[in-house]
Image (cartoon, helix red, strand yellow):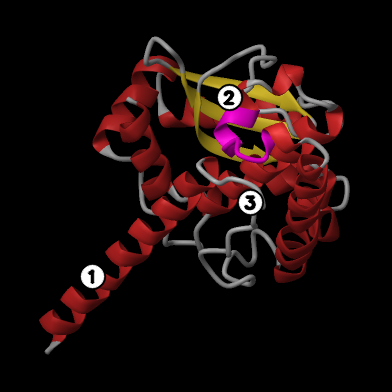
């Protein structure tokens, strides 16, 4: 009976992971009207690292506002209505500020939700990802220190990323506002596999201006299973 329950639970987790993977990848293939993907967990699932009130406001209001404003801006330009979100990001340098900021906000948040998991549920980096991190940064601890330093150093609002570059190497990158490494304007381009939102609305209710405390807690809710999947996909 215990074995059966274990197999059923394993199957459910695998199904949930597959659905989540399809959801975040599908966002890039969306056409207008765009839509906010549902959270792959309850709003309180990331406690105590990220509180339920912050998650509710962040997902239901901030992300929704980016999508609403993106759809509104798209409606003013019929030529873009058949474009996928990936296509919009690829030519962000030619878009109006409203389109660029809101398209970026939609993708960035969609990825952010997917690379989070309840404490103790995110697993560990795959053997392949762990080896790549060790090769590029020396150790997992050195990588975490470098990533945290980059995220702490973002002036004002923006994002920190772990990306796979064109040469297959792992790189840490940061972007301002709602830009991301898929955009041609990014100083470091590549395929994002881990995203960290350092806008104040991502942490202010619990941490106020203590961004380093938010970053320290955030590591406990990283979904390494999804990050590993994205690394395999990008590689």
* Residue at the image position 21 percent from the left and 78 percent from the top: 8
Of all residues, the one furthest to the bottom in this rendering is: 1
* Residue at the image position 35 percent from the left and 47 percent from the top: 124
Q: Which residues are magenta?
A: 80-88
Q: Quadrant of the N terminus?
A: bottom left
| Inter-mark Cα distance, 3 to 2 | 27 Å
Q: Which residue corresponds to mark 3?
A: 217
- Disc 2, SS: loop
- Of badges 2 and 1, nearer the viewer stands 2
Q: Which residue corresponds to mark 2?
A: 182
Image quadrant in which you'd find residue 15: bottom left
Q: Could you tell me if the residues under marks 2 and 1 are in contact, i.e. CB atoms within 8 Å?
A: no
Of all residues, the one furthest to the front in this rendering is: 78
| Inter-mark Cα distance, 3 to 1 | 29 Å
Percent position (x, y) of residue 231?
37, 33
- Disc 1, SS: helix
In terms of sequence position, does the residue under pointer 3 or pointer 1 come before the other?
1
| Inter-mark Cα distance, 2 to 1 | 33 Å
Residue 170 visible in the snapshot: yes
The 10 Å Cα crowd at callout 1, few under 14, some 14 to 19, many 20 or more, is: few
């Amino acid at each position: 009976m215990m074995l059966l329950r274990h197999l059923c639970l394993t199957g459910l987790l695998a199904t949930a992971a597959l659905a989540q993977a399809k959801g975040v990848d599908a966002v890039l293939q969306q056409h207008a009207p765009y839509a906010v993907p549902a959270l792959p967990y309850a709003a309180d699932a990331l406690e105590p690292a990220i509180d339920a009130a912050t998650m509710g406001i962040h997902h239901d209001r901030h992300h929704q506002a980016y999508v609403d404003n993106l759809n509104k801006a798209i409606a003013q330009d019929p030529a873009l209505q058949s474009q996928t979100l990936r296509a919009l990001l690829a030519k962000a340098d030619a878009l109006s500020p409203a389109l660029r900021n809101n398209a970026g906000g939609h993708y960035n948040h969609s990825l952010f939700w997917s690379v989070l998991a309840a404490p103790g549920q995110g697993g560990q980096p795959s053997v392949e990802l762990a080896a790549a991190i060790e090769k590029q940064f020396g150790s997992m601890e050195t990588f975490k220190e470098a990533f945290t330093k980059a995220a702490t150093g973002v002036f004002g609002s923006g994002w920190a990323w772990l990306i796979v570059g064109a040469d297959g190497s792992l790189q840490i990158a940061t972007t301002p506002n709602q830009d991301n490494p898929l955009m041609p304007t990014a100083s470091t381009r590549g395929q994002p596999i881990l995203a960290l939102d350092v806008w104040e609305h991502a942490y202010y209710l619990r941490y106020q201006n203590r961004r380093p405390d938010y970053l320290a807690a955030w590591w406990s809710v990283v979904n390494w299973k999804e990050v590993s999947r994205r690394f395999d996909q990008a590689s």
